[in-house]
Amino acid sequence: MRLSKYPVNSKGLIGIDKSVAHLESLLKKESKKVRVIGIWGMGGIGKTTIAEEIFSQNHFEYEEDVKIDTPNRLSSDIERRIGRMKVLIVLDDVKDTDQLEMLFGTLDWFRSDSRIIVTTRDKQVLIANEADD
C-alpha cells in the first residue's frame, strides 16, 4: 500500500514530536550507501504513525513516482528505475527477517541518498538486515 502524501493529523499525539525529530535527523545523515532506519517495539505504540509522519514531512525530497504492486520481488525493470532514483521507502510491520532480501535482494543498487524505513515488532528483523539506526 502506498502512503498518502497528505499530512498525518498528529496533533494531540503526546511524545510524537521528539521521535519524529530524531528520525528526521537520521534521514539527513550522510552515507556512502542507502541507510536503513528501523522503528521497533510492541504493537500499538505508534510505529506506523511515526513512519507516516516522517513520510508526509519528507516525501517531497525524494522521487516517488514508481508504482510497485508485487508481493514477492521487484521486477528487474523496477530495480533499474529505483536504482537511479533518490527514494524514500517505508516498509510497515515487517515480520520476517527475509522480507527485505526477498523484495530488494541487495541494497547495493540503491543510490546512497536513498532511505528505507522499516517498522517491526521484532528487533531481530532489523539486526538481520543490518539496519543503520
Image: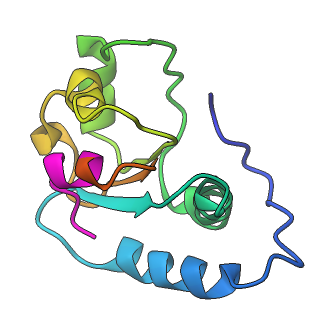
Question: Left or right: 101 with respect to 5?
Answer: left
Of 8 and 6, the residue lying toward us: 8
Magenta residues span 125-133
Residue 53 placement (x, y as % from top left)? 67, 64
- Residue 57 within the segment the image draws in magenta: no
Q: Which residue is at a point 69% across and 85% down the rendered structure image?
A: 15
Residue 109 placement (x, y as % from top left)? 14, 38
Question: Left or right: 119 with respect to 31?
Answer: right
Q: Is residue 54 above or below residue 72?
A: below
Q: Which residue is at a point 16% across and 41% down the rendered structure image?
A: 107
Q: Quadrant of residue 35?
A: bottom left
Location of the N terminus (image quadrant): top right
Q: Is residue 51 above or below residue 11?
A: above
Residue 59 placement (x, y as % from top left)? 58, 56
Q: Which residue is at a point 31% across and 31% down the rendered structure image?
A: 96
The total of numbered circles placed on residues is 0
Of 8 and 42, the residue lying toward us: 42
Looking at the image, what colour scheme do you see?
rainbow
Of 21 and 87, the residue lying toward us: 21
Q: Is residue 99 above or below residue 7?
A: above
Outermost front residue = 42
Q: Quadrant of residue 133?
A: bottom left
